[in-house]
């Protein structure tokens, strides 16, 4: 979560565009009521932990998941998991893939994971992992997010 201090001329829509998140998420996070008018100096809670975690990568001719993972400083398994691919699956020119941003660490849960194993994976306290995710079910295949400070 971020805190944004409203500036003169800001609207709920302009703040949403600034953070690239749906306006409804700002409304919910701040319990705003219609007509959603903002006042300069007002503070807004911005729920950024669920948004702005991916870049989009368009596959170029000759790309492989391995090449893209190396170029983007991530792993083949993570790119495959995020995009619903088998790590050995063929990718094609023009295909768009989600790639984790550099300030975000992601983990896809496996059978037997606990909050402690997630904490160890990110090398942060358990509360930091919990704070970064709205819901953690510890079911295999859940995407867990940790935004680096």
Image (tube, helix red, strand yellow):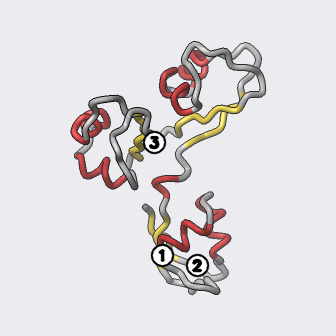
Q: CA distance from mark 2 to mark 1?
A: 17 Å
Residue 128 locus on image (x, y percent): 29, 50
Secondary structure type for disc 1:
helix
In the image, residue 110 sits, relative to residue 61, either above or below, namely below
Front label number (3 vs 2) = 3
Residue for point 45% across, 69% down: 3
Residue 30 locus on image (x, y percent): 48, 75
Task: Answer left or right for 106 relative to 67.
Answer: left
Secondary structure type for disc 2:
loop
Task: Answer left or right for 12 relative to 127.
Answer: right
In the image, residue 54 sits, relative to residue 108, either above or below, namely below
Q: CA distance from mark 1 to mark 3?
A: 24 Å
Q: Earlier in the sequence, mark 3 or mark 2?
A: 2
Task: Answer left or right for 125 relative to 72.
Answer: left
Dividing the picture into quadrants, the one containing residue 64 is: top right
Q: Which residue is identified by label 2?
A: 7
Residue for point 53% across, 37% down: 100
Secondary structure type for disc 3:
strand
Residue for point 45% across, 63% down: 2
Residue 53 locus on image (x, y percent): 53, 45
Q: Which mark is residue 30?
A: 1
The N terminus lies in quadrant = bottom left
Dividing the picture into quadrants, the one containing residue 61 is: top right
Q: CA distance from mark 3 to mark 2?
A: 28 Å
Residue 74 locus on image (x, y percent): 49, 26
In the image, residue 105 sits, relative to residue 19, either above or below, namely above
Q: Which mark is residue 104?
A: 3
């Amino acid at each position: 979560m971020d805190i944004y201090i409203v500036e003169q001329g800001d609207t709920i829509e302009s703040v949403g565009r600034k953070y690239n998140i749906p306006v409804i998420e700002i409304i919910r996070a701040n319990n705003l009521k219609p007509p959603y008018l903002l006042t300069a100096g007002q503070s807004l809670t911005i729920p950024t932990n669920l948004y702005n975690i991916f870049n989009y990568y368009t596959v170029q001719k000759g790309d492989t998941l391995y090449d893209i993972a190396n170029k983007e400083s991530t792993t083949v398994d993570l790119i495959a998991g995020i995009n619903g691919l088998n790590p050995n699956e063929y990718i094609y020119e023009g295909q768009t893939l989600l790639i984790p941003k550099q300030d975000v660490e992601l983990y896809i849960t496996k059978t037997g994971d606990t909050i402690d194993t997630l904490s160890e994976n990110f090398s942060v306290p358990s509360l930091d992992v919990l704070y970064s995710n709205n819901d953690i079910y510890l079911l295999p295949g859940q995407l867990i997010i940790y935004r680096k400070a």
